[in-house]
Amino acid sequence: MWQYLTDSYNWSGNEGIWARILQHLWYTFAALGLSVVIALPIGLRIGHTRRGAFLAINLGNAARALPSLGLLMIAVLLTNQIGFLPVLIALVALGIPPILASTYAGLSGVDPATIDAARGMGMTGREILTKVEIPIGLPLIISGIRSATLQIVSTATIAALVSLGGLGRYVVDGLKLRDFPQMFTGALLVALLAIVLDAVFALIGRITVSQGLKIG
């Protein structure tokens, strides 16, 4: 594996390690961005109104329980194509539950007395959401996005199963060729990428969350 990593040939070109890392990041952030766009507003809505929580959270947990390969096959059948779209659908299905659950938990955990005090000061429902509930729930919201990121970046290797790129190519191609150094390299790079992204979101959390609200 060390020889594979230190060979400059394996780092260059359209199929080199740098190119595969960029492809993997593209799959990850495309799915993460869409997951946030879908799950965050729903989580804010049900957390603020306390309505529909049971249905939304349980549907999310049911999607989380499905195996990633099964989700990919379902997405391929639904879209009737092999390529980026079914991979995106499968990854988004895995990214939505942690964001949805954490956003709801962050808002629903706000002390009712705090909300009553804000309402007594004349704040509207929107102002309570944006100025009270979201800032207080932000640590859990960011925690959910971190969890979704780890879930997506580690699962994005399935893109290689439908002839796409990313770091999963090393695992799939290495298994096919019985090239174990290549397989281990792919697995190691995915793990390192997950650690780096988790550290980035941890840093974002430290910067954006008020000192009195940090949860570690």
Image: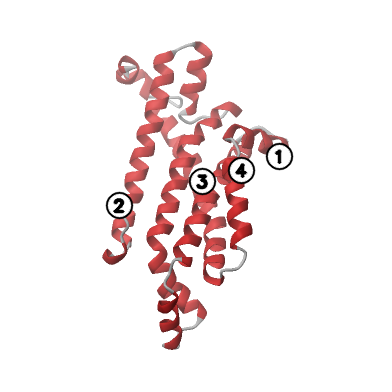
Q: Residue at x 33, y 40 (%)?
A: 196
- Residue 194 image offset from top left, x and y in percent: 39, 38
Measured Cα–Cα span from mark 2 to mark 4: 28 Å
Determine whether 207 is above or below 132 in the image. above
| Residue marked by disc 1 | 79
Measured Cα–Cα span from mark 1 to mark 2: 38 Å
- Residue 8 image offset from top left, x and y in percent: 32, 20
Residue neighbourhood size for the residue with mark 1, other residues' Cα within 10 Å, grouped as few (<14), some (14–19), many (≥20): few
Tell me, for residue 30, which label it has, or none: 3
Residue in the foreground of this view, choosing between 203 and 4: 203
Residue type pointed to by label 3: Ala
- Residue 141 image offset from top left, x and y in percent: 43, 58
Residue in the foreground of this view, choosing between 154 and 167: 154
Residue type pointed to by label 4: Ile
Asked whether the residues under the numbered discs 3 and 1 touch, taking CB atoms below 8 Å apart as contact, a structural biologist would say: no
Measured Cα–Cα span from mark 3 to mark 1: 18 Å
Q: What's the image's color scheme?
A: secondary structure
Q: Which image quadrant: the N terminus?
A: top left
N-terminal label among 3 and 2: 3
| Residue marked by disc 4 | 89
- Left-right relation of 10 to 176: left
Q: Residue at x 57, y 48 (%)?
A: 61
User: What element does badge 3 sit on?
Assistant: helix
Foreground label between 1 and 2 = 2
Tell me, for residue 203, which label it has, or none: 2
Asked whether the residues under the numbered discs 4 and 1 touch, taking CB atoms below 8 Å apart as contact, a structural biologist would say: yes
User: What element does badge 4 sit on?
Assistant: helix
